[in-house]
Image (tube, rainbow, N blue to C red):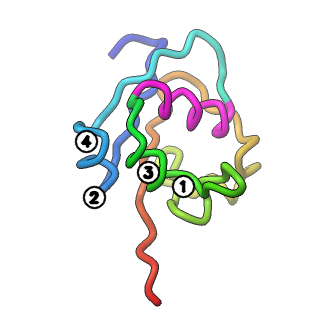
Amino acid sequence: MPADVIPVRLIGVLGSAAGNREIMLRARIILTVQELISALLKTVGNKFFRELLVDAGTDDPRSNVIILLNDQDCNIFDGLKTQIEPGTKVTIIPVAHGG
């Protein structure tokens, strides 16, 4: 894997909506989690994927998904401001809501 790539694994319905279970995002600089989410939304370009990934009112993904950085929840670091270096494994897991 090239040094300037961040592999993003999409679990469950996210992978189905994106049409791919793993997306390789190019990142020549260190990205924050929020910047990674924005880049992912642009890369996929799918309205259904956007609705699954981020809350429409806040553009915050954390109520809809768990974001793991090298298998650790980003919220134990600096949340959406956590910096992601190229090569960090990102896994995004949808949260099932009941009601």
Q: Nearer the viewer, mark 4 or mark 1?
A: 4
Q: Is residue 84 left or right of residue 86?
A: right
Residue denoted by label 1 = 72
**Does residue 40 belong to the magenta stretch?**
yes
**Does residue 73 belong to the magenta stretch?**
no
N-terminal of the two: label 4 or label 3? 4
N-terminal of the two: label 3 or label 1? 1
Q: Secondary structure at mark 3?
A: strand
Per the rendering, the mark at residue 12 is: 2
Q: Secondary structure at mark 4?
A: loop
Rendered image quadrant of residue 57:
bottom right
- What quarter of the picture does the N terminus occupy? top left
Q: Which residues are magenta?
A: 32-43
Query: CA gap, disc 4 to disc 3?
Result: 10 Å
- Residue visible at 76% across and 41% down in the picture: 81
What amino acid is at disc 1?
Gln
Residue 83 in the image: above or below residue 92? above
Per the rendering, the mark at residue 21 is: 4
Residue denoted by label 3 = 92
